[in-house]
Image (cartoon, rainbow, N blue to C red):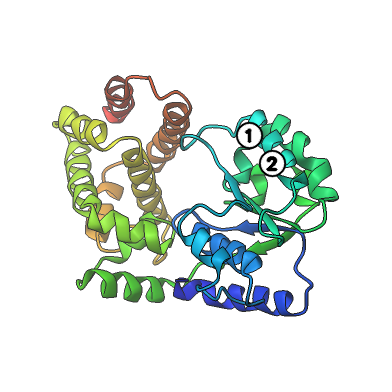
């Protein structure tokens, strides 16, 4: 079942399927938390379907095998862990799958999830196959942005971008799912991605975010008490908290510059105002830059001591 914000793009693909004009290598660019895997698998299932051309019939042998995750002509690779690269051996396996004969005398589909994680070696290994795939082989690649893909891969694919739904539509959809109202902050903290926003609220991260911002704002008031309370919250909830604090600092700086809207912390604007009146713009920018650097460092090196590094960063707010 597709999500509402995917319907328009899916209809475009259906037209190409009906006209037999679907490119042999589809690149789907989509925000994390937008459910692009659902859309990619819908396309794969349709290409493999034995009865219909523009949507899966759900009753043929192929559709049933697909739903059981045992279709012999559907292959997928992805990083073993989030943030890790796809190994070159896994990519080379795609080349072997591409040349195999179909087990069901139909199409073969190869899905590469998070294609931006292939790296240069993996990308080079599959270039020739993407450019001239064997007959009856459909490639589907997903990624979050073009920036993280090699141009040589991009040039061999037909690119499609999944639109981000309007904020009001995300709010309505999540509230319908949860049967409760949600703050706009929760949507903006997740870059407008519906599924990420849903998980954020369902797991109580919206409450933990509010508690962190409150504790952080109190720490920034002289005499800067509560540094270890803030640190404990960051340590408990991981590096995502550093992004929250970064957004908050940027909101404070924007308020100082006279910006009147587009704040991530829409419902916490009073707290933004309080901090903006106490901390200089220069310090806000400097600490914002440092926390973004710290986030990237912790993202790349998971074994580092987040508690120690956050304390060190927070001391940067304590003026002599």
Q: Quadrant of the C terminus?
A: top left
Residue 263 visible to the viewer: no
The crowd level at tag 1 (other Cα within 10 Å; few <14, some 14-19, many 20+) is some
- Residue bearing the label numbered 1: 90
Q: Where is residue 276 in the image (x, y as percent from the top left)?
A: 30, 49
Residue 299 — which label?
A: none
Q: Position of residue 67 (x, y in %)?
A: 47, 61
Q: Quadrant of residue 226?
A: top left
Q: Distance between the residues labelled 1 and 2?
A: 7 Å
Q: Where is residue 205 in the image (x, y as percent from the top left)?
A: 24, 50
Whether pointer 1 and pointer 2 mark residues with C-beta atoms closer than 8 Å, the reply is yes
| Image point (69%, 41%), residue name | 94
The crowd level at tag 2 (other Cα within 10 Å; few <14, some 14-19, many 20+) is many
- Residue bearing the label numbered 2: 94
| Label 1: which secondary element | helix
Q: Which of 267 and 274 is in front in this view?
A: 267
> Height in image: 170 above or below 118?
below
The reply, left or right, for residue 188 in relation to residue 124 is: left
């Amino acid at each position: 079942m597709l999500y509402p914000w995917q319907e328009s793009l899916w209809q475009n693909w259906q037209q190409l399927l009906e006209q037999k004009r679907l490119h042999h290598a589809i690149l789907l660019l989509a925000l994390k938390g937008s459910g692009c895997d659902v859309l990619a698998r819908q396309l794969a299932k349709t290409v493999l379907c034995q009865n219909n051309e523009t949507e899966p019939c759900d009753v043929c042998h192929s559709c049933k095998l697909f739903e059981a995750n045992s279709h012999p002509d559907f292959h997928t690779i992805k990083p073993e862990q989030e943030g890790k690269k796809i190994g070159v051996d896994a990519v080379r396996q795609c080349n072997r799958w591409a040349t195999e004969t179909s087990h069901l005398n139909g199409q073969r589909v190869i899905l590469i999830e998070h294609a931006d994680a292939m790296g240069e070696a993996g990308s080079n290994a599959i270039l020739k196959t993407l450019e001239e795939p064997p007959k009856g082989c459909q490639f589907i690649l997903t990624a979050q942005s073009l920036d993280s893909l090699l141009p040589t891969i991009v040039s061999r694919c037909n690119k499609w971008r999944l639109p981000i739904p309007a904020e009001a539509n995300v709010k309505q959809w999540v509230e319908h799912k949860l049967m409760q109202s949600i703050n706009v902050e929760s949507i903006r903290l997740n870059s407008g991605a519906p599924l990420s926003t849903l998980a954020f609220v369902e797991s109580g991260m919206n409450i933990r975010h509010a508690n962190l911002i409150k504790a952080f704002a109190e720490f920034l008031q002289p005499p800067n008490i509560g540094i270890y309370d803030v640190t404990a919250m960051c340590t408990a909830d991981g590096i995502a908290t550093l992004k929250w604090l970064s957004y908050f600092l940027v909101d404070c700086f924007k308020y100082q510059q006279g910006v009147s809207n587009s704040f991530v912390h829409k419902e916490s604007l009073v707290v933004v105002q309080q901090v903006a009146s106490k901390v200089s713009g220069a310090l806000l920018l400097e600490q914002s830059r440092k926390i973004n650097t710290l986030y990237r460092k912790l993202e790349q090196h998971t074994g580092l001591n987040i508690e120690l590094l956050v304390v060190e960063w927070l001391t940067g707010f304590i003026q002599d």
